[in-house]
């Protein structure tokens, strides 16, 4: 009866079933729990009894696991399998470090690095390093586990913890363990990506001092650092330094240099590098040509960029979708949609499918040109091809409909964004505030502004300027100035657009003196007034007939090197002509023409309205 009761599974608690079974033939009583010992644990791992490993108690002593790991350290693949069935993260730091040290000898560093990344979340870098150092010295031979210290640097780099990674580098050199070149490259690359160029040079100098050999990857990273610092000449000189160290520049080396030159607007220099590249027998790839095309498009050298594309096609190199998109973007910015569409068609012909970015560029320019129905057709075509609109697509659509004054359509796409789980951006909300302002729906604009802040979206300068413009245009100057106060509270610094808008609002009210005070406030805040600032005051004074004050502003404008514009002269001429100053207005006409400013229809309209002898004026104009 006792035996039956003992063997009845219903009387056994689940945790008493957890045991390690030997691999030999078992007795009839083999289902009875056996004590978990070092030998039974090692035997279970070696015999791949993972079902039982997975059900080991959570409270196994770390010392038992450490002893087991040490017995298996010559078989890191078994430790890896054990770690995939037993959560090592429940153990103490020393045991986890011992496991990481053993796993570091696997062909892939990932298992060791992943375990170390977990440790770095719960322990300081110094503690982890010391535990790892002791763990590697427990293994035989110690040098076989030295790679784990490199893995710790890699783990820090993957976590973007550059200071911890550099500190670990220092710890390693302090223990006379030289980091691998690959490890140093990871840290150099992280410093470069984080724009911590000075620290990158400190590390590079340390590598040189310690005799750690630089690879082509090392040189590529340092050339990129020099390019980021704008030291293009020095970056180019590094090609010669590579030869001194017997390292041959790769296509990546040259591409890095070309990218650096193009980014700084030095496309001519980039072309010389391409020539040097070819002369040295390094074949350019599609990325090389793509960089040049991008650089030329930024400088609006579109014909030359098109020539590079033709060269690529002639040598049998198919440009990437990114390269085609760069050209499409260039011609869209130029307003040449026909050429932009021709590259979309060529792209398809060459076997490159248009991307969402391609459609975004074309749809945006169609909206900019007011071709709304064609833009809608492009969106339908995009969806028919199975392309999913992204946040940029929706922002283009919303902005496009806002520009055309179609608030209903704009909010429809805003709601569709939310339905599809695409989070609206600040640009989205700025466009919606703009269209509400233009439709004089300022209460709704204020409500939306408050709503997005409750959602945790912090307004930026552009959004504030859009809302301030709406209130100024609708005569709500009190609310406009309260928004200026909110900007200061939120540490959003106003710019000349902010103050120009407020000045225009004051001038609409006829309060030109208060607008002038705002100009002085701008200067005190270190914001430089522009020609719009002065034109606003000139226009305000002219409308009131205060022509002496208007000309004083014009003189001030000239004294600080701000050149008058067509709007400046039109405002002065209009004011003079309304106040019987037609002769002086004609003198201004000569002055503006002398400055190379071409009068427009408004100029002549104001003059004709204000001068006495129109016939004589027109006759002079004909001559």
Image (cartoon, helix red, strand yellow):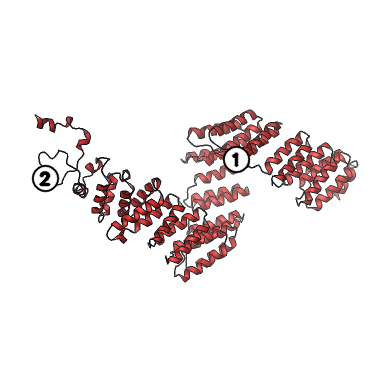
Which of 448 and 71 lies nearest the eye of the viewer? 71
Instruction: Give the number of callouts.
Output: 2
Q: Which quarter of the rendered picture does the N terminus lie within?
A: top left
Cα distance in 3D space between marks 1 and 2: 74 Å
Residue 69 rendering spot, x and y as whole percentages: 26, 51
Horizontally, residue 577 falls left or right of residue 27, namely right
Give the camera-side residue of 508 and 520: 520
Q: Residue at x 82, y 45 (%)?
A: 552
| Residue located 23% across and 42% down the image | 51
Q: Residue at x 47, y 71 (%)?
A: 244
Where is residue 13 drawn, in percent x and y?
20, 32
Return the x and y of residue 582 as percentages of the image width and height: 88, 43
**Residue 152 appearing in the image:** yes
Left or right: 526 in relation to 135: right
Q: Secondary structure at mark 1?
A: loop
Which label was assigned to residue 460?
1
Q: Is residue 95 above or below residue 210?
A: above
Q: Which residue is mark 2?
A: 25
């Amino acid at each position: 009866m006792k035996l039956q009761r003992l063997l009845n599974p219903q009387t056994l608690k689940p945790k008493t079933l957890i045991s390690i079974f030997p691999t030999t033939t078992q007795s009839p009583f083999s289902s009875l729990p056996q004590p978990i010992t070092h030998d039974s644990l090692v035997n279970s791992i070696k015999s791949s009894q993972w079902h039982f490993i997975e059900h080991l108690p959570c409270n196994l002593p770390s010392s038992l696991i450490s002893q087991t790991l040490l017995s298996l350290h010559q078989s890191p693949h078994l430790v890896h399998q054990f770690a995939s069935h037993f959560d090592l993260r429940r153990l103490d730091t020393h045991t986890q470090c011992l496991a990481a040290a053993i796993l570091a000898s696997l062909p892939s560093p990932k298992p060791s690095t992943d375990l170390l990344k977990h440790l770095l979340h719960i322990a300081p870098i110094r503690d982890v390093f010391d535990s790892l150092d002791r763990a590697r010295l427990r293994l035989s031979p110690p040098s076989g586990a030295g790679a784990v210290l490199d893995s710790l640097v890699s783990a820090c780099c993957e976590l973007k913890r550059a200071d911890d990674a550099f500190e670990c580098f220092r710890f390693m050199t302090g223990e006379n363990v030289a980091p691998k070149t690959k490890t140093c490259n990871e840290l150099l690359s992280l410093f470069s990506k984080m724009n911590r160029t000075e620290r990158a040079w400190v590390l590079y100098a340390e590598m040189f001092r310690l005799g750690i050999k630089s690879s082509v990857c090392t040189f590529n990273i340092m050339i990129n650092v020099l390019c980021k610092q704008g030291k293009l000449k020095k970056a180019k000189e590094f090609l010669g330094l590579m030869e001194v160290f017997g390292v041959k520049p790769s296509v990546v080396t040259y591409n890095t240099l070309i990218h650096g030159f193009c980014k700084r607007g030095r496309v001519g220099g980039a072309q010389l590098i391409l020539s040097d590249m070819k002369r040295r027998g390094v074949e350019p790839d599609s990325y090389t040509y793509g960089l040049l095309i991008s650089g030329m498009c930024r400088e609006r050298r579109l014909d030359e960029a098109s020539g590079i594309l033709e060269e690529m096609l002639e040598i049998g190199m198919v440009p990437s979708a990114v390269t085609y998109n760069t050209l499409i973007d260039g011609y869209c910015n130029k307003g040449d949609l026909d050429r932009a569409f021709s590259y979309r068609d060529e792209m398809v012909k060459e076997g490159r499918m248009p991307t969402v970015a391609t459609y975004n560029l074309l749809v945006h320019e169609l909206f900019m040109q007011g071709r709304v129905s064609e833009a809608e057709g492009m969106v339908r075509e995009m969806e028919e091809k199975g392309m999913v609109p992204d946040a940029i697509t929706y922002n283009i659509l919303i902005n496009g409909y806002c520009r055309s004054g179609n608030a209903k359509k704009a909010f429809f796409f805003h709601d569709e964004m939310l339905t599809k789980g695409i989070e609206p951006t600040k640009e989205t909300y700025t466009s919606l505030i703009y269209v509400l302002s233009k439709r004089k729906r300022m209460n709704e604009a204020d409500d939306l502004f408050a709503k997005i802040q409750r959602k945790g979206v912090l307004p930026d300068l552009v959004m504030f300027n859009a809302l301030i413009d709406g209130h100024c245009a609708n005569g709500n100057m009190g609310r406009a100035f309260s928004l200026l106060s909110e900007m200061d509270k939120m540490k959003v610094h106003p710019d000349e657009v902010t103050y120009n808008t407020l000045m225009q609002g004051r001038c609409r009210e006829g309060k030109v003196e208060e607008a002038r005070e705002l100009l002085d406030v701008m200067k005190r805040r270190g914001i430089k007034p522009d020609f719009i600032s002065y034109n606003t005051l000139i226009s305000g004074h002219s409308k009131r007939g205060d022509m002496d004050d208007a000309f004083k502003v014009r003189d001030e404008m000239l004294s600080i090197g701000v050149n008058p514009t067509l709007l400046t002269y039109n405002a002065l001429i209009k004011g003079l002509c309304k106040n019987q100053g037609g002769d002086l207005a004609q003198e201004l006409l000569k002055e503006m023409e002398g400055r190379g400013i071409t009068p427009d229809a408004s100029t002549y309209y104001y003059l004709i309205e204000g001068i006495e002898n129109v016939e004589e004026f027109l006759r002079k104009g004909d001559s």
